[in-house]
Amino acid sequence: MIFDPFYMTIMLISMAIAGAASVFTKSTFKKYARIPTRRGLTGAQAAQRLLQSNGITDVTIEPIKGFLSDHYDPRSKVLRLSPDVYGSSSLSAIGVACHEAGHALQHAQNYAPLGLRSALVPAANFGSNGAWIFLVVGGLFNWPVLMQLGALIFVAVVVFSLVTLPVEWDATARAKRLMVSSGIVEAQEGVAAGRVLDAAFLTYIAAAITAILHLLYFLTRAGLLGGRD
């Protein structure tokens, strides 16, 4: 596939979209990481206040290594924040911390898309790796059925990426609203912190577009869309 012009086109488009989203997200984060909030709460403190003000007391907040590696783990009810977020009082840190706390709120309130995304994780992980194996083996041995199976199981990756969009958008909307109403930042600061989250959302859009483009490749090579070369 490395010499397949169609595949190379898909890869170049995907890399361009993902790269642009990543650069914009990082530059926006760094811009607002230089601006401290007036109330001086750190990311960890902001997340804790947001959770407590909404009646959530069973979520642990802990640091994790890596740049923008922040995430909420619903299985263990742990909110993990990166070094640039956990101990920082910048607008970027507050925005990201409150966004991740938004996921904890979703979990506590049984937000359906979050539950669906969690349920899709095993299928998406299998599809992202297994689909390529089926496609390559099917192509080498000229087994169209195997190639078609690879294309079909990759659908789980696309569905996961699409379900992720409302989950992340909702967490961002909660963060924008609650970081102000919970007294974490002032209204004008909330607008600025929200810009960081809007930029980060573009990375999820890029991931969804990339998944769709790869699915089109799978379907085409498997003869399920436009035939096979």
Image (spheres, rainbow, N blue to C red):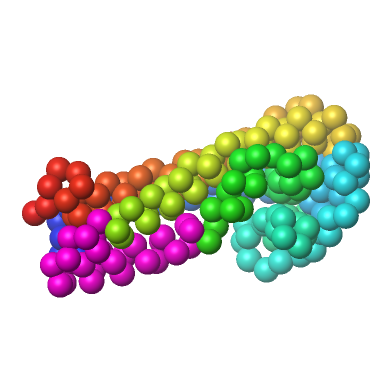
Residue 67 placement, left or right of 50 = left
Q: Position of residue 52 (x, y in %)?
A: 91, 44
Q: Report the residue at 85% width, 42% height from top.
A: 50
Residue most toward the top?
187
Instruction: State the residue lying farthest toward the left.
Output: 229
Position of the N terminus by quadrant: bottom left
Camera-side residue of 64 and 39: 64
Q: Residue at x 20, y 47 (%)?
A: 224
Residue 46 seen in render: no
Range covered by the magenta-colored residues: 123-148
x%, y% of residue 148?
Answer: 25, 56
Q: Quadrant of the C terminus?
A: bottom left
Query: Who's the residue at 67% across and 56% down the image?
Result: 71
Which residue shows up at 30% across the image and 60% down it? Answer: 150
- Tell me if residue 217 comes above or below residue 62 in the rendering: above
Q: Residue 49, position in %: x, y?
A: 89, 45
Name the quadrant containing residue 145: bottom left
What is the count of numbered marks?
0
Residue 146 among those drawn in magenta:
yes
Percent x, y of residue 57: 91, 51
- Asked if residue 176 can be seen in this view, the reply is yes
Q: Is residue 203 above or below residue 144?
A: above
Query: Looking at the rendering, which quadrant does residue 196 occupy?
Result: top right
Q: Is residue 208 left or right of residue 171?
A: left
Dominant secondary structure of the magenta stretch?
Answer: helix
Decide whether residue 131 is among the magenta residues: yes
